[in-house]
Image (cartoon, rainbow, N blue to C red):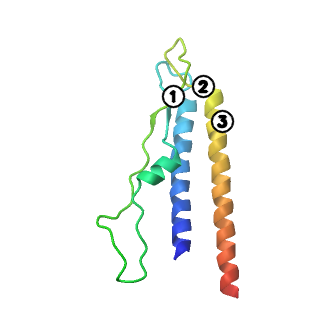
Amino acid sequence: MIANDVFGVAARQASWLLARQRVVAQNVANANTPGYKAADLKPFEATLHSASLPLVTTSPMHFTTAGEGEPAAPAAEKADNAEVYFSGNDVSEEAEMAKGNEVYRAYSLNTSIVTAFNNMILQSVKG
């Protein structure tokens, strides 16, 4: 059923957004720490492409894959900030606030899509 796919991808994106918000918050919290290097996550699209999404089958004649499972949690990697400050710190508070805003907008969009899809399913069931 396609509903499982939509809700599954939405749940994975919500998990990724939570992980990215944690990384952004950690960067902001360490903005004055000497030598701290800002981190960020790979884009969700790259994470989604590298994840093994299980195939849904409705017939025993459909192909199956071996080793289907949950992908690992996204790992933070060094951010590409241009300016390194005298203390060796490269956290740009403006860039981190922009990332936090991106996370907020993406989460709002994710929630809106899931809500709309859920309402569409409810309307189809009511007949």
Residue 1, percent across and down?
51, 77
Residue 124 is drawn in which quadrant?
bottom right
At x 51%, y 50%, the residue is 45
Residue 82 is drawn in which quadrant?
top right
Badge 3 element = helix
Separation of residues labelled 2 and 1 (CA atoms): 11 Å
Query: Measured along the vertical axis of the image, is residue 27 above or below residue 56?
Result: above
Q: Earlier in the sequence, mark 2 or mark 1?
A: 1
Badge 1 element = loop
Q: Tag on residue 80? A: 1
Q: Tag on residue 56? A: none
At x 51%, y 28%, the residue is 80
Q: Earlier in the sequence, mark 3 or mark 1?
A: 1
At x 48%, y 42%, the residue is 42
Q: Residue furthest left?
A: 66
How would you rate the neighbour count of disc 1 (Cα within 10 Å): few for under 14, some for 14-19, many for 20 or more? few
Q: Which residue is mark 3?
A: 98
Labels 3, 1: front one: 1
Q: Tag on residue 92? A: 2
Q: Nearer the viewer, residue 56 or 14?
A: 56
